Image (tube, rainbow, N blue to C red):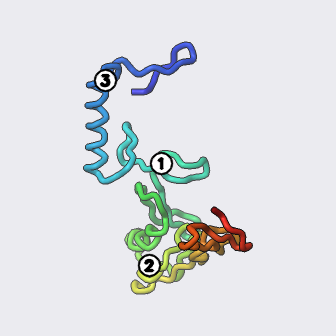
């Protein structure tokens, strides 16, 4: 149901020209989104998610692999539709163990896998996971909104330089 281009102008596909049919299609799509508790869904590939990647935010699946350092062989893999990676590394450990029969002494991952909760889970399972630690909150600059104060009596804000904003 893509909009068609004719002479540089967009027009609705034939099946959506009727307002009642179009309204019914929209209601059905919104009901489907509500049923799956999501704000978006690709019409031709429902499991795909909007995921930030090297080419910006687009529809993707999320492929994960674990590689043996010595042989450079993939020892486990999975494809999921999670938008974030940080909950996926520890879940891969049992898959790797099932493939090679043992758990690695150490698992190394990039900063996308940093999650205090996941690292705690790994520790409880006796798995050593090494990832770069991210700062929990970036330092706000001098004019970040947290640096402004509100004067309720005057109903105005005071900036970090002492200037009043009316």
Closest to the camera, between mark 2 and mark 1, is: 2
Q: Label 3: which residue?
A: 19
Q: Is residue 38 above or below residue 26?
A: below
Question: Which SS class for mark 3?
Answer: helix
Closest to the camera, between mark 3 and mark 2, is: 3
Quarter-of-image position of residue 164: bottom right
Q: State how far apart marks 3 and 2 are (Cα).
A: 49 Å
Q: Nearer the viewer, residue 96 or 119?
A: 119
Residue drawn 34% across the image and 23% down it: 16
Q: State how far apart marks 3 and 1 are (Cα).
A: 32 Å
Q: Nearer the viewer, residue 107 or 96?
A: 107
Closest to the camera, between mark 3 and mark 1, is: 3
Left or right: 17 in relation to 112: left
Find the residue positioned furthest to the right.
161
- Residue 60's disc number: 1
> Percent position (x, y) of residue 28?
26, 37
Question: Which SS class for mark 2?
Answer: helix
How many neighbours does mark 3 have within 10 angstroms: few (below 14), some (14-19), or many (20 or more)?
Answer: few
Residue drawn 41% across the image and 47% down it: 48
Left or right: 21 in relation to 61: left
User: Do tag 3 and tag 2 residues touch (Cβ < 8 Å)?
Assistant: no
> Percent position (x, y) of residue 112?
55, 67
Q: Compare marks 3 and 1 and give the one earlier in the sequence.
A: 3
- Residue 117's disc number: 2
Picture quarter with the N terminus: top left
Find the residue positioned furthest to the front.
153
Question: Which SS class for mark 1?
Answer: strand
Quarter-of-image position of residue 14: top left
The answer to whether residue 103 is visible is no
Q: Nearer the viewer, residue 57 or 106?
A: 57
Picture quarter with the C terminus: bottom right
Q: Compare marks 2 and 1 and give the one earlier in the sequence.
A: 1
């Amino acid at each position: 149901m893509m909009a068609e281009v004719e002479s540089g102008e967009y027009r609705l596909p034939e099946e959506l020209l009727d307002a009642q049919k179009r309204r019914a299609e929209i209601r059905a799509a919104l009901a489907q989104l509500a049923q799956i508790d999501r704000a978006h869904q690709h019409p031709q590939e429902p499991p795909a998610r909007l995921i930030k990647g090297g080419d910006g935010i687009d529809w993707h699946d999320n492929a994960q692999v674990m590689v043996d350092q010595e042989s450079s062989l993939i020892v486990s893999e999975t494809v999921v539709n999670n938008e974030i990676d940080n909950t996926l590394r520890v879940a891969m450990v049992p898959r790797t163990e099932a493939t090679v029969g043992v758990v690695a002494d150490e698992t190394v991952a990039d900063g996308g896998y940093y999650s205090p909760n996941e690292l705690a889970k790994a520790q409880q399972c006796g798995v050593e996971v090494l990832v770069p630690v991210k700062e929990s909150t970036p330092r706000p600059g001098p004019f970040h909104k947290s640096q402004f104060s509100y004067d309720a009596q005057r109903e105005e804000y005071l900036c970090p330089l002492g200037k009043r904003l009316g």
